[in-house]
């Protein structure tokens, strides 16, 4: 009797398993991770917290110089920060990471990345103001569905996309720490710069009337807009959790925080330095683009020379 009972229970479980396979309705939770690797991948968000920089006492800093840089994503070396233009699996561009951290679509999110309107990060933007600076105001026609004729116009905001951020402006400070006898650089703020299309064409006022109106239109250059100023220390916790493409060895995991904060794997040039005139940029006194790049190198060489001249042999 006991053997019959055990056999019946065994047959019941075997039948239940086959029924699940035939019906295809497995109750197991399906994995949500994208299929990218044949091995078990560590979660991206399990990266460690940002590495804290060495504490600096003000009394140990007897020299510092502030400069502003531009990181142009059109340069080949900076492509890992621009691509992918759309989210692909666990891969996100630097701009997409920043957009996700700002989270302007959810104003109630109190943990979203704060954005400021000034370089000293004193004026914090409200969720509505963040949405406005990350949107392009446009106008569209309202068409009567019955007659197909224009009856009115309405204004709306078209949100910028991450691929429209083509450069970043960073503010950094170079200083010499006499306690450790080292020259260091720390990034203070970062400002994403959006480049977007203006109206596709504009009439040329100097053109003569023509039957073909397209001949009277000229191409309009792209407009640039600052997407707000972000404290670098506020952004680092988001960057350390996002893996980026390592062009040298993709198996060597590298986060955006590692690449920018510590390894400084980016191409850039200085467009402004701390000076007597407060906000004077290099382009204000040097007009030739080639000479502007030379001046940028001179500024950095001047800072590095200060450290070299401290040593005597």
Image (cartoon, helix red, strand yellow):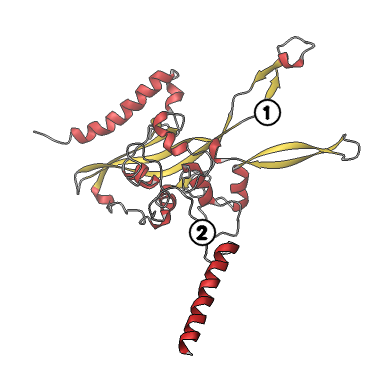
Question: In the drawing, does residue 82 fall left or right of residue 63?
Answer: right
Q: Quadrant of residue 106?
A: bottom right
Q: Residue at the location (63% across, 51% down)?
A: 128
Which residue appears farthest toward the left when viewing the image? 313
Q: Nearer the viewer, residue 17 or 227?
A: 17
Q: Nearer the viewer, residue 205 or 99?
A: 99
Element on which disc 2 rests: loop
Q: Nearer the viewer, residue 16 or 266?
A: 16
Image height of 27 relative to 120, above or below = below
Q: Give the position of the C terminus as an image quadrant.
A: top left
Relative image position of residue 9 (x, y in whole percent)? 51, 81
Relative image position of residue 68 (x, y in whole percent)? 40, 35
The Cα–Cα distance between marks 2 and 1, rounded to whole angstroms, is: 36 Å
Residue carrying label 2: 111
Q: Residue at the location (28% across, 30% down)?
A: 302
Image height of 245 relative to 112, above or below = above
Tell me the number on the disc at residue 176: none
Residue carrying label 1: 199
Q: Quadrant of residue 261?
A: top left
Name which of mark 2 and mark 1 comes first in the sequence: 2
Relative image position of residue 297 (x, y in whole percent)? 33, 26
Relative image position of residue 217 (x, y in whole percent)? 70, 17
Q: Quadrant of residue 41?
A: bottom left
Which residue appears farthest toward the right when viewing the image? 147
Q: Is residue 104 visible?
A: yes
Q: Is residue 278 visible?
A: no
Question: In the drawing, does residue 96 fall left or right of residue 136?
Answer: left
Q: For the residue carrying disc 1, how many other residues have a C-alpha within 10 Å: few (<14), some (14-19), or many (20+)?
A: few
Element on which disc 1 rests: loop
**Picture mark count:** 2
């Amino acid at each position: 009797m006991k053997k019959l009972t055990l056999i019946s229970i065994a047959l019941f479980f075997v039948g239940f398993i086959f029924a699940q396979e035939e019906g295809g309705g497995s109750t197991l939770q399906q994995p949500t991770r994208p299929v990218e690797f044949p091995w078990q991948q560590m979660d991206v968000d399990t990266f460690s917290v940002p590495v804290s920089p060495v504490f600096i006492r003000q009394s140990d800093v007897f020299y510092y110089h502030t400069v502003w840089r531009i990181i142009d994503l059109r340069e080949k070396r900076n492509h890992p920060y621009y691509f992918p233009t759309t989210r692909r699996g666990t891969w996100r561009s630097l701009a997409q990471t920043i957009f996700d951290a700002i989270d302007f679509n959810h104003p109630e999110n109190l943990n979203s990345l704060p954005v400021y309107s000034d370089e000293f990060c004193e004026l914090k933007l409200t969720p509505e103001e963040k949405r406005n600076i990350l949107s392009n105001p446009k106008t569209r026609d309202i068409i009567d569905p019955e007659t197909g004729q224009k009856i009115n116009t309405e204004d709306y905001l078209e949100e910028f996309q991450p691929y429209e951020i083509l450069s970043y402006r960073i503010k950094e400070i170079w200083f010499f720490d006499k306690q450790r006898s080292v020259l260091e650089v720390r990034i203070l703020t970062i400002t994403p710069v959006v480049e977007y299309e203006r109206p596709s064409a504009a009439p040329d006022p100097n053109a003569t009337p023509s039957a073909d109106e397209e001949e009277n239109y000229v191409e309009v250059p792209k407009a640039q807009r600052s997407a707000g100023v972000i404290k670098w220390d506020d952004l680092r916790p988001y960057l350390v959790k996002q893996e980026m493409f390592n062009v040298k060895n993709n198996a060597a995991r590298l986060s955006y925080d590692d690449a920018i904060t510590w390894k400084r794997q980016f191409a850039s040039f200085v467009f402004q330095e701390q000076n007597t005139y407060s906000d004077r940029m290099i382009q204000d006194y040097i007009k030739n683009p080639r000479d502007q790049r030379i001046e940028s190198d001179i500024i950095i060489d001047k800072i590095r020379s200060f450290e070299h001249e401290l040593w005597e042999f």
